[in-house]
Amino acid sequence: MKNDKFEIKFWGVRGSIPVSGPEFERYGGNTSCIEVKYGNRHLIFDAGTGLREAASSLTADGTHDVDLFFTHSHYDHIIGLPFFDAIYDPKLRVNLWSGHLNGTTTTRQLIGQFMRPPWFPVEPDICRAKLAFRDFRAGDTLKPHDGIVIHTAKLNHPGGCIGYRVEWAGRVIAFLYDTEHVAGKLDEAALYLMQDADLAIYDTTYSEAEMPKHIGFGHSTWQEGVKLAKAANVKQFALFHHAPARSDAELDKMQADARESFPASFAAYDGQMIEL
């Protein structure tokens, strides 16, 4: 990797629940997990099942410091954490960030409630890495390391969800994992995060035809994402958080339809890498 580039790796692009089978081979079945590398830094956004595979990348790079940002703590976004080898490695420092619980629960408490019997056989005190817990609130600006700035905003999702805008060396990536739009009104938080982004990654779980059955579920559509991408002058637009039953053939069609309206659209897949 070049030191002057953002490198984005999609380790998990599915929503709700991991899937497997021949109809999901090309786009993959892991739940949400995206890694961003810049310089010698590693940032990971969400701890879905893709996080297990991301661990091998960290080992190969000889990483000693990683930042893991949670958008929220629904199962599909945290279930990979106990299987993230980095938290058991005494040579590593892992910084864990969350801001979706409005100060009612700390990041440390969140992990402790999830990684314990009867839901998991052991508790976080088995972890040997140096764990640092970082709490924030939606709207805060984060500066985890020199030269990088991360803006945050509250997204429209049951239980809360954080959207991130990551800025470094003139590049911008927007992460909008789980959010539901209001018909006929462009989301101001989404526009703020996506404005002039080099890459916007957006929750396209549904199509507009499917949306009436899923109002209140906390997810959006590729059509709404394209509207936002156009309005925000986005350079590349990633369809993300694919519905668990969405087959490769259906995602091919969704990608083609999105490209008719916004040619720089693509449906993200497990293992995909992008340089900015």
Image: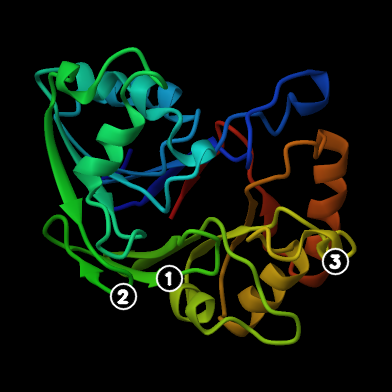
Residue 115 pos. (x, y %): 32, 26
Image disc number at residue 139: 2
> Between 25 and 132, which is closer to the camera in this rendering?
132
- Kind of residue at badge 3: Pro
Kindly identify which numbered label has been placed on residue 213: none
The residue to which callout 3 is attached is 212
61 left or right, relative to 259: left
Q: Earlier in the sequence, mark 1 or mark 2?
A: 2
In this rendering, position of residue 220 left or right of residue 188: right
**Foreground mark, 3 or 2?**
3
Q: Residue at x 33, y 51 (%)?
A: 5
Above or below, 67 against 141 in this view is above
Label 2 sits on what residue type? Gly
Q: Secondary structure at mark 1?
A: strand
Q: Residue at x 49, y 68 (%)?
A: 155
Residues tagged 1 and 2 counted as in contact (Cβ below 8 A): yes
Q: Give the residue type at disc 1.
A: Lys
236 relative to 242, above or below: below
Report which quarter residue 186 is drawn in.
Answer: bottom right
Residue where numbered disc 1 is placed:
154
Please state if 269 lies on the left or on the right of 85 as rendered.
Answer: right
Secondary structure of the residue carrying numbered label 2: loop
Q: Which of pointers 1 and 3 lies earlier in the amino acid sequence?
A: 1
Q: Kindly indicate the quadrant of the structure image that contains residue 29.
A: top right
Q: Are marks 1 and 3 in contact (CB under 8 Å)?
A: no
Query: Where residue 241 sits in the image (x, y, percent)?
Result: 63, 47
For numbered disc 3, what is the local secondary structure? Answer: helix
Mark 1 packing: few (<14 Cα in 10 Å), some, or many (20+)? many
Which residue is situated farthest in the top direction here? Answer: 121
As measured in the structure, the alpha-carbon distance from the residue carrying label 3 to the one carrying label 2 is 30 Å
Q: Is residue 120 above or below residue 180?
A: above
Q: Quote the CA–CA distance across marks 1 and 2.
A: 7 Å
